[in-house]
Amino acid sequence: GLTSTPFGVSFQEGALYGTLGLWLAGAHARWRGPSDPARWQVEHLTSVLAAYTVVWLFITFLYITVLPQTARVLIPAALGTMAILWARRRFEGRRVPQTPATGPLPGAA
C-alpha cells in the first residue's frame, strides 16, 4: 500500500495534517466577518496563535535535534492546539457593544 509520499512525509502524517486543515476550514466557514465583532476578535487571536504554532513547529523540527522527530512535531503542535482551544473557550462568548465604530458594515449579512 501507500506508505509515504514523494515529499518524504508519511501517509499518516499527511492524513493528520489534511484532517486538521479541513477542520480549520470548516471552523472559518462559520465566521461571518466584521458583522460579528466578537467572533472577529477571536479569529484574529487564534490566527496569531496558529501562526506562532507553525513557527515553533519549524524551529523545533529544524534545530532541536536532541528530541526524536515525533516529539519535535507533536510538542509544539499540541501546545499550539491547546492555546487555540483555550482562547476559543475563553473569548468565544464575549459580546462587543454595538457602537457606530464597531457596528455591522453596510450590506453585511
Image (cartoon, rainbow, N blue to C red):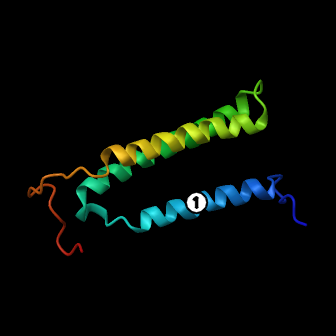
Quarter holding the C terminus is: bottom left
**Where's residue 39, x and y in %?**
30, 56
Identified at 23% across, 64% down, the residue is: 35
Identified at 71% across, 28% down, the residue is: 63
Amino acid at pointer 1: Gly
Residue farthest along the left direction in this orientation: 100
| Dot 1 crowding, Cα within 10 Å, few <14, some 14–19, many 20+ | few
Q: Quick check: 70 above or below 30?
A: above
Using residue 63 as the reference point, say whether residue 20 is left or right of it: left
* Quarter location, residue 45: top left
**Where's residue 33, x and y in %?**
31, 63
Q: Quick check: 58 above or below 33?
A: above
| Mark 1: secondary structure | helix
Q: Quick check: 87 above or below 92?
A: above
Identified at 30% across, 50% down, the residue is: 41
- Residue designated by label 1: 21
* Quarter location, residue 86: top left
Quarter holding the N terminus is: bottom right
Identified at 68% across, 56% down, the residue is: 16
Q: Quick check: 33 above or below 88?
A: below
Relative to the observer, which residue lies in front, 22 or 63?
Answer: 22
Residue farthest along the right direction in this orientation: 1
Using residue 71 as the reference point, say whether residue 36 is left or right of it: left
**Where's residue 77, x and y in %?**
60, 42
Relative to the observer, which residue lies in front, 28 or 62?
Answer: 28
